[in-house]
Amino acid sequence: MRAVTRRTAMKWGVRMAWHQGLLAVLLVMLVGPARAELAIPLGEGGDQLDVRVIEPPQGAPEDGPLVLWVVNQYGDLPGPESVALALARRGATVWMVDVMDSLFLPRSDVNVRNIDGEPVGSLIQRAVEAGRPTVVVAADRMAVPTLRGMRWWQERSDDPEALAGGVLIFPSLYRGAPVAGEEPELFSIIDATNLPVMLLQPERGVYRHRLLDLRERFLAAGSDLFVQVVPEVRDYYHMHLDEPQPETLEHLDRVMDDPAEARAVQSLPDDILRAIPLLAAAAHPTEVRPIDPERTTPVDRQTGLQPVEPQEAPAFELTDLEGNPQRLDPDFDGVQIVNFWATWCPACVEEIPSMERLASRYPDRLKIYAIAFKQSPEHLREFMQDFDVSFPVPVDPDGAVAAKYDAFAFPSSFLVAADGRIHYSVNAGIIWDTEEVDAIVRELLEIEPE
């Protein structure tokens, strides 16, 4: 039992006998998790990981699990912290570490994907010394440095079972966005991971249709992979809380706009705790898989319209917000732009006005299909009230059409010429009424330059 001094008792206004003061302080501590700080040295250069330790309330069993929470590249957010506090209330100790902050790294996609295995590996190495069931949790792009850290630790450990495994929430495991329509490439750490992993994949997430391929890659590497599809939510679902919930997750339906997201966040602490025994019981190979050095760095993102090898544009038939069927017109003597977007994507929204201005230049020879990715018509109708557009907004409810086009990033757009083939694509938001874009459109329309 933790010793409590008379001075501490006085601080709490307790002027009773010693045993009464001790009881009073313990009762206060039982209200919620306790917090502490921990510093873990990295190498010999003076760097260190600054770890926030969230402990269960006093009196909880001392052999509860240890959850290593690798903070997302965007830093501390109310949602993950609320989940961490809920884990502590369930008896887990949570170590939260912001690797980018500890290493003074700017919060860019490239910097995240370039983090090697030492930071998370050192975190694991320190954690397993306690001899408790230990799991490491990460989301989005932080999944890559987390897997690297698991392998880094595995290379140096004589007991790979000391770490139950990793829980990855909507992991982004790709080297970056390729030219729109081309197959993205996974980081080589996927093929070098054979420790057990649990994937929590949102049903409406961007990478949902790639889940089976990803599963095969993990299994081929020797990892015992577990997959849980989180129903009715999209990526970042646990990051959409505006205010921390330090005491309970029971009332999230009052503070979150999406009831499905509220349910998913409420379930997340138990999802993580249920994963620990599954991962711990899986195989933990001692042999470390080799890693391909050619696929360890991120690829440069392609910006602007890119010429592609002409290929037949996949057919589709969707319904727009007016209830009208929308499909590619095989007999259209002009350019058809197939655009995939979503209301949660700022770049998608920013390009809508310039897309409308381009459409107005060629009203008879340019068609635009702004296909909304996995969104409800009700939400879209309300959202589109702020925009005056002439082109249809078809709804791709399950992302099947986006998958046909191999749309990887959002927005993604494909320019289809009169021959029915894709000639240009772009996997980023652009300004559509520039001279450069106009020149490409006129080229496909076979109009002489002005």
Image (tube, helix red, strand yellow):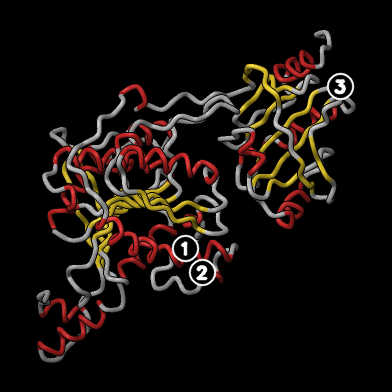
User: In the drawing, does residue 261 fall left or right of residue 391?
Assistant: left
Would you identify the image quadrant in which residue 244 lies? bottom left
Which residue occupies the foreground of this view, 276 or 251? 276
Residue sitting at x 21%, y 85%: 24
Check disc 3 and give the amino acid type: Asp
User: In the drawing, does residue 420 fall left or right of residue 45?
Assistant: right
Residue sitting at x 56%, y 71%: 254
Residue contact at pointers 1 and 2, CB within 8 angstroms: yes
On residue 104, which mark appears? none
On residue 252, which mark appears? 2
Residue contact at pointers 3 and 1, CB within 8 angstroms: no
User: In the drawing, does residue 209 fall left or right of residue 153?
Assistant: right
Pick whichever of labels 2 and 3 is earlier in the sequence.
Answer: 2
Where is 46 relative to 381, above or below?
above
The residue that disc 3 covers is 333
Pick whichever of labels 3 and 1 is earlier in the sequence.
Answer: 1
Which residue occupies the foreground of this view, 36 or 446? 446
* C-alpha distance separating marks 1 and 2: 8 Å
* Rendered location of residue 51, percent (x, y): 25, 52
Q: Residue furthest right?
A: 364
Q: Secondary structure at mark 2?
A: helix
The residue that disc 1 covers is 265
Q: Secondary structure at mark 3?
A: loop
